């Protein structure tokens, strides 16, 4: 499953970029989006995702990434846009998990093209 590290890292990098773009919203509408605490929350989420990129091949990264989505949805109580991002990226992570499960099942049955004899 080493090939799964790439999509995990790419998804995390994309998520970091999108989460950091929410700083534009938080700083423009600071009073309605938690002010300084909202900025700190967004920066902490982005930092946690950057750390997860480093460990993209570890088995605990997927549960940690899904936990970050829960934090984002709950953080949406403070910064409204985080709820939408948490739901959207949560669906992306669930899609990746389903693809990973499908590949693992095909690998176990020997149905991958690389496992077939010519």
Image (cartoon, helix red, strand yellow):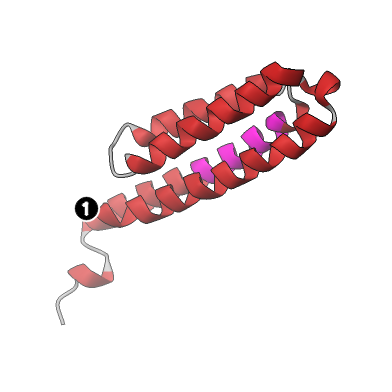
Residue at x 26% of width, y 72% of height: 113
The residue shown at (54%, 26%) is 44
User: Predominant secondary structure in magenta?
Assistant: helix
Circle 1 sits in a helix, a strand or a loop, which is it?
helix
Instruction: Report x, y in % for residue 95.
Output: 51, 47
The residue located at (48%, 25%) in the rendering is 67
Left or right: 79 in relation to 17? right
Question: Viewer-proximal residue, 17 or 8?
Answer: 17
Q: Nearer the viewer, residue 26 or 69?
A: 26
Residue at the disc numbered 1? 108
| Residue 110 in which image quadrant | bottom left
Across and down, in percent, residue 87 comes to: 65, 35
Q: Is residue 108 left or right of residue 74?
A: left
Across and down, in percent, residue 104 comes to: 29, 50
Left or right, residue 34 beside residue 48: right
In this picture, which residue range is highlighted in magenta?
Answer: 82-93
Residue depicted at x 51% and y 28%: 68
Examine the structure image and report whether residue 43 is included in the region drawn in magenta: no
- Quadrant for the C terminus, please: bottom left
Q: Is residue 84 magenta?
A: yes
């Amino acid at each position: 499953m080493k090939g799964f590290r790439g999509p995990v890292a790419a998804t995390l990098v994309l998520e970091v970029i999108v989460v950091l773009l929410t700083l534009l919203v938080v700083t423009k509408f600071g009073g309605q989006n938690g002010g300084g605490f909202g900025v700190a929350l967004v920066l902490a989420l982005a930092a946690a995702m950057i750390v997860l990129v480093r460990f993209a091949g570890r088995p605990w990264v997927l549960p940690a990434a899904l936990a970050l989505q829960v934090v984002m949805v709950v953080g949406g109580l403070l910064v409204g846009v985080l709820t939408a991002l948490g739901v959207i990226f949560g669906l992306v992570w669930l899609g990746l998990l389903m693809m990973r499960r499908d590949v693992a099942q095909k690998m176990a049955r020997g149905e991958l093209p690389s496992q077939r004899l010519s």
